[in-house]
């Protein structure tokens, strides 16, 4: 299909040749007129009809390329035979031009060589010795320059059309990618919200439920224990509401998240006469982005809650190191260790996915059923949870496609490792 951007060139040339023929007929009376002039004009009008305006009505837009090129060449020949002015020779520069648009470069070069050959043969037959007559030599040179010019224009038009097609294809691909990114962003946001619900409200509401059950059980046996359990349940619900407000404040930018402050509140809330929790912090949190700090807080929350509820620990140590190239959180307890053959819970799986998205890792070590533990005092059992996240500037908190791919791979590898070794908490 010919490019519409250069379809104006043939009609303009036909009009110029037609005007030149009539001018020659007017100034050279008797040499070019009558039937010859009529055939000359009819041939050019037929060529103009092939280029009729309107992309849907023009025959050039409907006919196949091969018959269209043959029709043009035939009309060019008819016009050139009856032309008495010689100006119609310019029409043959359109043969390689239209061939370039329809068939490509190599066909156009062949047509250009054929046009030059026909011109030289015609001059040799009709004007013997033309090569020593300056007027004919100049005609051949001008014809060659015109061929070079139209081939250059046709090549530019073809390249422009190809560029437009590629650009349109790129726009369509970008639109599809944008839709895909929007879907992935929505899915990631849903996953993040689900993790927040589990890590924050889930822990608080579970604790409140346990305390309410305890209050109900001791309502008759020991009213003091029942009252203390109700107070603990109210404190859990109140803390859950505070965390919701803090999360909303962070999202709105009203109050930046502080890991050290949140850990201190967590330790104060979870520590009591049954569980001693000790917190040690080294370094400044200002060099880490909010995503890293929030993930480390959720990791501490998960590990301490597991130590209390499942490990039956009486002592937990929380060590946070913010110096160096990575932030590291270590939570150790003196509990029962890890049940043999257990699988990771939702909390640990979600934590690993979160940490992997940040390019970090989660390591869990501990004794099995109270045997071979890691407690610092040498007591059996116990679990040590270590979360390491590389330092990222607050401005570079966004995760790209490579990080996401690494995250998925790391999370899958961590899950396979857990299943192979039978380790789990959460």
Image: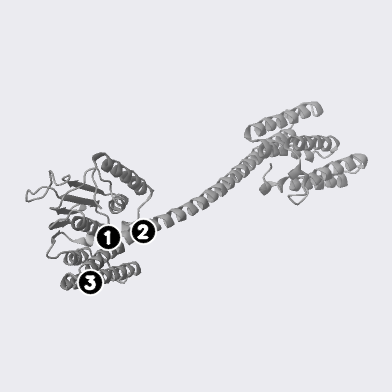
Which residue sits at x=75%, y=43%?
62
Q: Nearer the viewer, residue 244 or 183?
A: 244
Q: Earlier in the sequence, mark 1 or mark 2?
A: 2
Q: Residues within 10 Å of mark 1 (few under 14, many from 20)?
A: some
Q: Assign a secondary structure to mark 2.
A: helix
> CB atoms at circles 3 and 2 under 8 Å apart?
no
Q: Position of residue 12 (x, y in %)?
A: 74, 48
Nearer mark to the viewer, of 1 and 2: 2
Q: Earlier in the sequence, mark 3 or mark 1?
A: 3
Label 1 vs label 2: CA separation? 15 Å
> CB atoms at circles 1 and 2 under 8 Å apart?
no
Where does label 2 land, which residue? 194
Q: Assign a secondary structure to mark 1.
A: helix
Label 3 vs label 1: CA separation? 29 Å
The image quadrant of residue 132 is top right
The color scheme shown is: one colour
Which residue sits at x=12%, y=43%?
372
Q: Residues within 10 Å of mark 2 (few under 14, many from 20)?
A: some
Label 3 vs label 2: CA separation? 28 Å
Q: Is residue 374 left or right of residue 179?
A: left
Where does label 1 land, which residue? 294
Where does label 3 land, which residue? 230
């Amino acid at each position: 299909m010919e490019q519409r951007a250069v379809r104006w060139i043939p009609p303009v040339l036909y009009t110029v040749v037609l005007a030149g023929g009539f001018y020659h007929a007017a100034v050279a009376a008797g040499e070019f007129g009558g039937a010859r002039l009529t055939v000359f004009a009819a041939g050019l009008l037929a060529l103009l009809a092939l280029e009729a305006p309107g992309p849907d009505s023009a025959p050039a837009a409907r006919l196949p390329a091969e018959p269209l090129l043959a029709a043009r060449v035939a009309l060019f020949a008819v016009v050139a035979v009856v032309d008495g002015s010689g100006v119609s020779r310019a029409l043959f520069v359109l043969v390689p031009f239209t061939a370039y648009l329809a068939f490509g470069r190599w066909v156009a070069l062949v047509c250009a060589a054929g046009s030059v050959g026909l011109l030289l043969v015609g001059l040799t037959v009709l004007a013997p010795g033309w090569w020593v007559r300056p007027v004919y030599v100049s005609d051949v040179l001008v014809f060659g320059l015109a061929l070079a010019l139209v081939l250059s224009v046709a090549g530019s038009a073809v390249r422009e059309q190809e560029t437009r097609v590629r650009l349109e294809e790129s726009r369509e691909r970008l639109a599809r990618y944008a839709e895909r990114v929007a879907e992935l962003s929505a899915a990631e946001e849903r996953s993040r919200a689900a993790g927040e619900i589990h890590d924050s409200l889930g822990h608080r509401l579970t604790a409140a439920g346990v305390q309410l059950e305890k209050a109900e059980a001791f309502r008759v046996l020991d009213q003091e224990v029942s009252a203390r359990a109700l107070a603990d349940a109210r404190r859990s619900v109140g803390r859950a509401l505070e965390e919701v407000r803090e999360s909303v404040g962070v999202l709105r930018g009203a109050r930046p998240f502080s890991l050290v402050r949140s850990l201190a509140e967590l330790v104060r809330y979870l520590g009591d006469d049954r569980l001693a929790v000790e917190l040690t912090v080294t370094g400044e949190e200002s060099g880490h982005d909010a995503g890293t700090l929030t993930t480390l807080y959720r990791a501490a929350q998960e590990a301490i809650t597991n130590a209390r509820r499942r490990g039956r620990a009486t002592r937990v140590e929380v060590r946070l190191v913010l110096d160096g190239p990575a932030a590291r959180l270590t939570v150790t307890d003196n509990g029962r260790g890890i049940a043999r053959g257990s699988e990771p819970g939702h909390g640990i799986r979600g934590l690993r996915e979160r940490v992997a998205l940040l390019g970090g890792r989660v390591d869990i070590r501990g004794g099995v059923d109270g045997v071979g533990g890691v407690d610092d005092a040498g007591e059996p059992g116990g679990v040590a949870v270590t979360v390491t996240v590389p330092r990222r500037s607050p401005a570079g908190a966004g995760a790209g496609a490579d990080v996401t791919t690494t995250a998925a791979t790391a999370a899958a590898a961590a899950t396979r490792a857990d299943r192979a070794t039978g380790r789990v908490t959460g």
